[in-house]
Image (cartoon, helix red, strand yellow):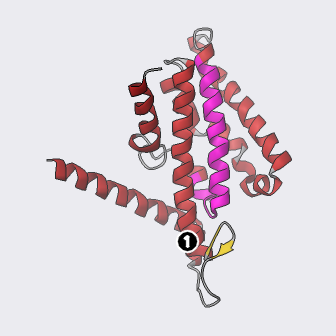
Amino acid sequence: MKRSKALTILRNGLLDENPTFRLVMGMCPTLAITTSVANGFGMGMAATFVLIFSNLFISMLRNFIPSKVRIPAYVVIIATFVTMAELFLEAYAYSLYESLGVFIPLIVVNCIILARAEAFASKNTPLYSALDGLAMGLGFTGALVIISAIREILGSGTILGFHLFGANFQPALMVSSAPGGFITLGLILGFINWMTNRKGGNKE
């Protein structure tokens, strides 16, 4: 593995092509489950597991899967690892499993995972594909945790269930609602775009 390419893959997943903050993909779980850091982290880790192993197996089988049926084949591979993640959470993290609910099986149709299978894993070696899955998964997880932390702190006054403020704290309940998810994400995207444009202007 070339170090330069590996670093580029990691940077793309974490920063330059972050699936949430740059590509704006996977919005359904991003807006629905990010009311607490525990939920955001759990969903991110489940998606990361699926990304790594689906990318790895799709890359390994890319020369054996006929082009005409590649998408159904990818979905079957992805669904296999989603089922494994779901059964693991149900057995060892049942409270998280209940909190995430239907959004765990919906990882199968998460556009991030299918997009990486089609755009990267089907065209690269297994090792690079697994690294791409890890980078994209960590980028997705980081984005979910950031959004979840903001919404949990402002909406509940807690972080991971620990109270941060005194009894007089008045939580902004709207932040925990669906509109609050849209507003939080929009403000973060606006800030990132502002910083990117400002950095580009400074270079010029």
Relative to 53, say whether 153 is above or below: below
In the rendered image, which quarter is residue 96 located in?
Answer: bottom right
Location of residue 52 in the rendering, given as x and y in whole percent from the top left corner: 61, 31
Relative to 168, say whether 59 is above or below: above
Which SS type dominates the magenta stretch? helix
Q: Residues within 10 Å of mark 1 (few under 14, many from 20)?
A: many
Query: As rendered, which of 185 and 69 lies closer to the eye?
Result: 185
Q: Which residue is mark 1?
A: 175
| 53 magenta-colored | yes
In the rendered image, which quarter is residue 104 located in?
Answer: top right
| 43 magenta-colored | yes
Q: Residue at x 32, y 54 (%)?
A: 193
Location of residue 140 in the rendering, given as x and y in whole percent from the top left corner: 54, 46
Q: Residue at x 42, y 26 (%)?
A: 3
Q: Secondary structure at mark 1?
A: helix
| Highlighted magenta segment, given as a residue range | 30-59
